[in-house]
Image (spheres, rainbow, N blue to C red):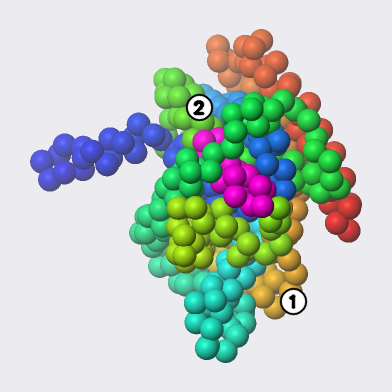
């Protein structure tokens, strides 16, 4: 707000965008960049249909859960505990926490691998830098920012770098955009050949149609203070978020399809993904990509590391914002330590990242069923109970998520 009491342009923009803009920031991170790059590099645009369906169903689910919170004032986890069954709430909470732990392992693994590779390529005379060194530096920096409560400033700085990477992807996509017929064929549902295709499809869906994203949406709507009179704004905000998720993710996939797929380049490590930016960044592709990838990773790592204490506070009906107790601060420290698994013990962070996204979608069917139960309760929703159309939409989402869960389990079993 300005000194004369008027609302500034930035505040008006944020009021118009609502919590959806934070959903985009949470969604488009290392997981999305990795999964969409692998999909484009391995299968071209043939999996575009997966992204279309995943973003469409995401829009339906975040609208539904945001609508429930706006009408009742209760978040998804709180409603599960009180109106469905505490066991279901705990199951969803545990599944999301396990997914968070898998995600922080993958995110930090990719960030440290990319940083170490960048140092080796840009400074060849410098001795090899262990992945643990940048991992410790990133973890300590994030924890200090968490303790000091400076995440908002940190997020704004990183948003600049992520935005630059996004611009590079869009500019690169224009230069290497696939043939229109390839894009059209990619809109027709078909599973490509290859043992890894089911896991990639599940990973693409898990990074978009995410239970964490849906539950976090209900939390942000509650914090926003939206009520039944804000349902139109809530729906508009959810649709905008889903559309932007699709546009950005499709641009990343198209870059990989137009560069790596046509050359037969596979993604085995984080640094391999730099080729998606080569047409626009040229010799600076490595630096541009590493800065953007690490920035996107750390900006999504922060919500991942604090989601567990957030969810614990939410299910106990305490505000998610505010000072954390010592036990919850120790939980965050523990999550950061888990994130150092790849630098310490080794592993392939790209595979871990895709697997974590695939695992995330396994609990989606239960979330859809719970949504149908809650949104059709007259005693909770009053005149705002689900319409027939919304019930059908959530039902289709349920069927799709069941199929994706099967693909995720099949793909994870193949890895094991």
Residue 52's disc number? none
Label 2 environment density (alpha carbons within 10 Å; few <14, some 14–19, many ≥20) = many
Q: Residue drawn at (65%, 72%), measured in percent from left and top? A: 340
Residue 301 in the image, given as x and y percentages of width and height = 55, 59
Front residue of 108/35: it is: 35
- How many circles with numbers are drawn on the protein? 2
Residue wearing tag 1: 345
Query: Is residue 374 shown to the viewer in this render?
Result: no
Label 1 sits on a secondary structure element that is helix
**Does the magenta segment cover residue 257?**
yes
Residue at 66% x, 47% y: name it: 262
Which structural element holds mark 2?
helix
Residue shown at 63% from the left, 62% from the top? 272
> Does 268 sit left or right of 218 as displayed?
right
For disc 1, the neighbor class at 10 Å (few under 14, some 14 to 19, many from 20) is few
First reached walking from the N terminus: tag 1 or tag 2: 2
Magenta stretch, main secondary structure, is helix
Q: Give the side of residue 127 with respect to residue 233, left or right.
A: right
In the rendered view, tell whether residue 30 sits above or below residue 67.
below
The residue under label 2 is 239
| Residue 332 image offset from top left, x and y in percent | 58, 65
Identified at 12% across, 45% down, the residue is 3
**Is residue 244 visible from the viewing direction of this image?**
yes
């Amino acid at each position: 707000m300005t000194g004369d009491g008027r609302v500034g342009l930035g505040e008006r923009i944020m009021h118009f965008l609502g919590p959806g803009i934070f959903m985009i920031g949470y969604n488009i991170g290392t997981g999305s960049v990795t999964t969409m790059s692998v999909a484009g590099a391995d299968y071209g645009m043939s999996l575009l249909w997966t992204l279309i369906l995943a973003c469409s169903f995401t829009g339906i689910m975040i609208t539904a859960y945001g609508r429930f919170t706006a009408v009742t004032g209760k978040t998804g986890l709180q409603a599960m505990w009180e109106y469905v069954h505490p066991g279901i709430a705990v199951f969803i909470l545990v599944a999301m926490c396990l997914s968070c732990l898998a995600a922080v392992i993958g995110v930090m693994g990719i960030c440290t691998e990319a940083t170490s590779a960048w140092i080796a390529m840009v400074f060849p005379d410098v001795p090899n830098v262990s992945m643990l060194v940048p991992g410790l530096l990133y973890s300590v920096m994030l924890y200090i920012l968490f303790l000091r409560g400076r995440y908002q400033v940190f997020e704004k700085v990183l948003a600049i770098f992520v935005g630059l990477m996004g611009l590079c992807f869009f500019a690169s996509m224009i230069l290497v955009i696939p043939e229109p017929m390839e894009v059209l064929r990619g809109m027709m549902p078909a599973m490509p050949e290859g043992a890894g295709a089911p896991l990639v499809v599940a990973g693409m869906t898990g990074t978009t149609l995410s239970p964490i994203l849906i539950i976090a949406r209900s939390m942000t709507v509650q914090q926003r203070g939206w009520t039944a009179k804000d349902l139109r704004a809530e729906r508009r905000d959810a649709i905008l978020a889903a559309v932007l998720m699709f546009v950005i993710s499709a641009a990343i996939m198209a870059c990989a399809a137009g560069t790596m797929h046509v050359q037969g380049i596979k993604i085995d490590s984080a640094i391999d993904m730099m080729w998606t930016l080569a047409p626009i960044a040229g010799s600076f592709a490595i630096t541009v990509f590493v800065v953007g990838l690490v920035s996107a990773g750390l900006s999504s790592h922060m919500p991942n590391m604090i989601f567990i204490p957030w969810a614990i506070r939410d299910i106990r009906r305490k505000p998610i914002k505010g000072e954390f107790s010592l036990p919850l601060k120790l939980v965050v420290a523990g999550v950061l330590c888990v994130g150092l698994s790849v630098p310490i013990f080794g592993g392939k962070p790209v595979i871990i990242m895709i697997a974590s996204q695939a695992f995330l979608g396994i609990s989606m069917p239960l979330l859809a069923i719970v949504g149908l139960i809650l949104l059709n309760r007259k005693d909770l929703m009053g005149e705002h109970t689900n319409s027939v159309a919304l019930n059908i939409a959530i039902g289709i989402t349920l069927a799709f998520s069941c199929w994706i869960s099967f693909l995720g389990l099949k793909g994870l079993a193949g890895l094991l």
